[in-house]
Amino acid sequence: MTPLIEVRGLRFRYEDGTAALNGIDFRLDPGETVAVFGANGSGKTTFVLHLNGLLAGEGTVKVCGLLVEKKNLAAIRRKVGIVFQDSDSQLFMPSVLEDVAFGLLNQGMDRAAAIARAHAALETVGMSAAAGRAPYHLSAGEKKRVAIAGIVAMEPDVLVLDEPTANLDPPGQRSLADLVARLPQAKILVTHDTPFALALCKRAVFFQAGLISADGTVEELVSRFDWDFTLGPSKLSR
Amino acid sequence: MHPAVLDRWSRGSSPVHRRDARAKLVALLVFLVCLATAHRALPWLAAGLLVLLAAALLWARLPLAAALARAAVVVPFGAVFALISWAAGDPARGLALVAKSYLSALAVLLVVATTPLPALLRGLEMMGAPPFLLAVGQFLHRYLFVISEEARHIRTAAVARGAAARDWMAPGVRFRSAAGALAGLFARSYRRAEEIHRAMRARGFGGRIPPLGEARFRGGDAVFAVLASLAPVALRVAVERVAR
Amino acid sequence: MRRCHPALTHGVTVGALVARFFNSCYREPTVHIPDGFLATPVWAVLDAAAAPAVVLIARRAQRGFDQAQAPLLGVMGAFVFAAQMINFPVGAGTTGHLVGGALLAMTLGPASASVVMTAILAIQALVFQDGGVLALGANAVNMALVGVLAGYLPFSLWGGTPWRRFSIFAGGFLSVLVSAVLALSELLISGVPMPRPMLGITLGLFLVSAILEGAITLAVLESLERIQPQAVRRPRAGRSPALGVLAVAAVLLASVGVLIASQAPDAIQRLTRLPAQEPAAWLSKSAAGLGGLALIYAACLALGRVASRNRSA
């Protein structure tokens, strides 16, 4: 079974010299949903940006057997779809439909087919009614759904969601979790939202200072790194 | 008035909304030139054009009073010169300035309130405007609200920390803190632009923003363009003939 | 033509000026000329002049066939809009705000800044009815072309020298002053009524706005250099400071010259009557005024090119 994503010895330094990734080994198999935990600045987002070649570091990154390098970028970006944290920066077209169709038109699909596929994607996320609207009218939850539609329309093999529940209220978080659970792709969920991760993932990895220091079930990592926010008498310091 | 209002109006439906953007733009240009070059019998022409535009607004199913009020933002500028002209003994000139600027603004409002901005920009592109400039305009319009919200948050936060308290804070300090706020907003906007570019590349952006809509210029659009262009011209010819 | 009592004229003028003062202080330090103010030859010639210039500059800002710069320029245009909300206290209970042409030029470069300013003018005219559509050419020449160039000129010449802070202030100052003076000249050539006292006070207001813009631009750029230093350009030291002083002086002189020429009394008198009556004299006066404008524009363009050649050498 070819892994969908295979990362070996990935290192990356920013322009100012700070080391962001210090040797990452990671593997994603078909059908898996992995949670990515870690403190802010531990390298989670930087890692994710290497998966579709937005950043390039040392080591190897392979997507569906293809090496992430310039000549494969177009194909790889069709296989790995990233939904970024800030929906406003992702929904940059004047209307919802145009935004969802953006990726398809870039692939060279003809207009009618792209529009049809975009409508289908909006249907999947439950935002068909918003097709003609401008993005700034939508709520945070609606924008997130449209952003997901834009990625899902491209029919990727891997779906990456970077902090998807940030800025969402609890009902929004719940309906997003329902939606994500229904999507068939293998998924990587970078999140601080432990209940969200518990609901959707079996496996999790923990980032610390540019390294993956643990790879196990979500429950194991949550209890090992105390990665849950619950107030109890034993946890309050006196 | 909030730009969201205009955006809502432009997504309505009416015979005027359904016309191709190019037809409306052509009619607009003819109207503006006809008005700008008129010198004789101006009060009559202005009245006639006002009636014409009001009728068009009603046909476009737009709220008449709100539209008339919105176009009036140009009036204060002209009113100043109208006052001066009146004081100098030439009220006709002053009235001409106010009437021309108001009617021009109203005509522009009519077109923009019946055409969603992306369609308008595409119409302009098909009429020969530089596509890069229009792309910049499209992104500007898209992020106008977003960045303004961020600016409002910054201002609210500053006011909450006493920025409006003139008594104890020296103007130099307030000046520098406003400059710092602006610099922060600049940096955030710059970073947002990088995020947008990153999101575009992640979806296969190849250098040109793909257009979605296909604007077709039908017979109805041609008829509209011709009739809408003739209306102000005919009105002007008639008014000038009667005034002679 | 009835002549009103002079006291009434003065009273109305003062009243109008007070209204203008508050209007300009709380809204725009720059003049967006609406439709209906400019005489036909004025707006037509400026539209004809601006159109090819904008096409050329858009191509230059685009950098090839890639539209990748469009999001950055669009977002920075939105920033300029949003920046109007941030008030800078001036004292005496008034506040001003950033206009932005010079700031954009010093961070994005003059070509990109011109494109952003043009896009801003178009959106302001279409969506906010602030400025006319036929007058877009005039407003673009004033604010997006000549204004940006005049704002960038001192910075490109002295931005890499110890005079850097002064050059930033001078850029902000010149961009607003030159734009405003050009707009005023165009209005005067078109015969818009403006009695002497109002003219004087309006010019005074322009000077205040220009100084404010210089101060704000400098303050914001200094703050910006601390948080995002690579955002601000670093032009290399120009080779001839004397040429620089000459260039700036030429720009100022030409602007003032056009202003003086355009308010020659006979021009105004000719234009308040029907233009059909004395075509020759009216044409020559307006040609002189417009020729002056073209000269300023050409001077800025040429000097800008010299400055950039100095820099890249």
Image: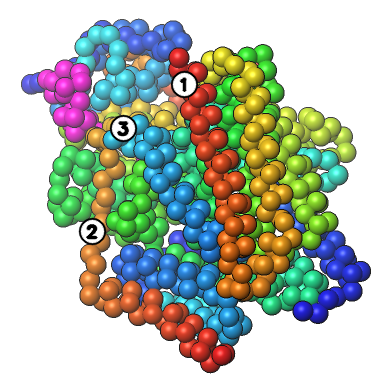
Label 1 – label 3 distance at C-alpha: 20 Å
Indicate the quadrant where residue A31 lies: top left
Tell me the mark number nearer the camera, choosing from 3 and 2.
Answer: 3
The residue where tag 3 is placed is C64
The residue where tag 2 is placed is B214
Label 2 – label 1 distance at C-alpha: 44 Å
User: Can the viewer see residue C282 in this picture?
Assistant: yes
Please state the chain letter of the residue tagged with numbered disc 1 in the rendered image: C
Direction from residue C30 to residue A33 in the image, left or right: left
What amino acid is found at the position of numbered circle 1 in the picture?
A: Arg
Please state the chain letter of the residue tagged with numbered disc 2 in the rendered image: B
User: Can the viewer see residue B2 in this picture?
Assistant: no
The residue where tag 1 is placed is C309
Q: From the viewer's side, name the closer residue of C178 and A161.
A: C178
Q: 10 Å neighbourhood of mark 1: few (<14), some, or many (≥20)?
A: few
Q: Which residues, given as a range, are shown in magenta?
A: A64-93
Q: Earlier in the sequence, mark 1 or mark 3?
A: 3
Residue B66, percent from left and from top: 56, 73
Direction from residue B104 to residue A37 in the image, left or right: left
Q: From the viewer's side, name the closer residue of C198 and B49.
A: C198
What amino acid is found at the position of numbered circle 3 in the picture?
A: Gly
- Write the residue at 30% across / 12% down: A57
Residue C142, percent from left and from top: 57, 47
Quadrant location of the C terminus of chain B in the rendered image: bottom right
What amino acid is found at the position of numbered circle 2 in the picture?
A: Glu
Direction from residue B70 to residue B214 in the image, left or right: left
Label 3 – label 2 distance at C-alpha: 26 Å
Q: From the viewer's side, name the closer residue of A32 and B218.
A: B218
